Image: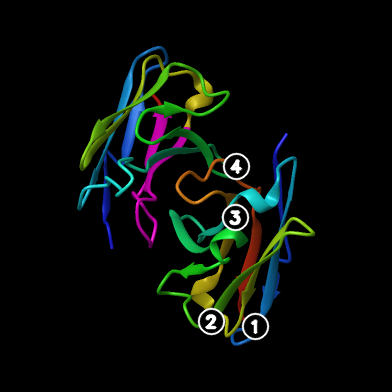
Amino acid sequence: DIVMTQTPLSSPVTLGQPASISCRSSESLEHSDGNSYLTWLQQRPGQPPRLLIYKISNRFSGVPDRFSGSGAGTDFTLKISRVEAEDVGVYYCMQATQFPQTFGQGTKLEIK
Amino acid sequence: EVQLVESGGGLVQPGRSLRLSCTVSGSTFGDYGMSWFRQAPGKGLEWVSFIRRNVYGGTTEYAASVKGRFTISRDDSKSIAYLQMNSLKTEDTAVYYCARGQYVADYWGQGTLVTVSS
């Protein structure tokens, strides 16, 4: 199974400041079709997960452009350019390149 | 607007069975594979199962923790995906989410709580 490791596990951020979350996979996420199926999900308190970023860097419909994804191979990053109060929650990276699909442990974003 | 609604959760004793349903609207159901995920109380997300589109044979995948006990299926005429859960264990207690898609789980339901307890 591919192991996904996120850092940090907790991220206190000041409103208006940037935030960054890293995700490392135990092996390359490049699929035989040339895509890397690395997804970032946001889970606000009491809510289901919501898709933010897919295939490393593609923002899903309706996701604010302050969210961006980058990376390749085994190292990936989610960045929030200016944190807003509504961004509080837990962020997960997930790989869907191969079964079983696996998640990082989650990073809790909170406001200082 | 794409919507996924899970149902069928509840309190069940260890060893018993439960069937979850995921009803999809606003989308051509048959064009997508469907996934089930779960989240134990206070824990992270875990993938449970996936079923491909019927054009790909409707073949299935399972997490090792549920293989042989859970069965995923789909009824394209009703736009519903099912998760039949047998021989339930206390460690299956979780909120179960369905999601659309294989490589990109783009839409998720609100979840249904399954509690396995005597």
Label 2 or label 1, whichever lies nearer to me, is 2
For disc 3, the marked residue is B97
Residue type at tag 3 = Tyr
Q: Nearer the viewer, mark 4 or mark 3?
A: 4
Between discs 4 and 3, the one toward the N terminus: 3
Q: Secondary structure at mark 3?
A: strand
- Ranked by sequence position, the earlier of labels 3 and 2 is 2
Tags 1 and 4 both on a single chain: yes
Relative image position of residue A86 (x, y in whole percent) = 54, 24
Do the residues under discs 1 and 4 have CB atoms within 8 angstroms? no
Corner quadrant of residue A112: top left
Residue drawn at x 68%, y 67% is B20
> How far apart in space, not on screen, are marks 1 and 3 (Cα)?
21 Å
Q: Quadrant of residue A33?
A: top left
Distance CA(mark 1)–CA(mark 4): 31 Å
Cα gap from disc 2 to disc 4, whole angstroms: 26 Å
Q: Is residue A91 magenta?
A: yes
Instruction: Give the residue type at disc 4.
Output: Tyr
- Asked whether disc 1 touches disc 3, contact meaning CB atoms under 8 Å apart, the reply is no
Quote the CA–CA distance across marks 2 and 1. 15 Å
- Residue B13 tag number: 1
**In the rendered image of this protein, does residue A15 appear above or below residue A96?**
above
User: Which residue position holds label 2?
Assistant: B69
Between disc 1 and disc 3, the foreground one is 3
Q: Is residue A11 magenta?
A: no
Determine whether the residue tagged by mark 4 lies in a helix, strand or loop. loop
Indicate which disc, 1 or 3, sits on the residue closer to the N terminus. 1
Q: Please, what is the three-letter code of the amino acid marked with disc 1? A: Gln
Q: Which residue is mark 4?
A: B107
Distance from the alpha carbon under mark 3 to that under mark 2: 18 Å
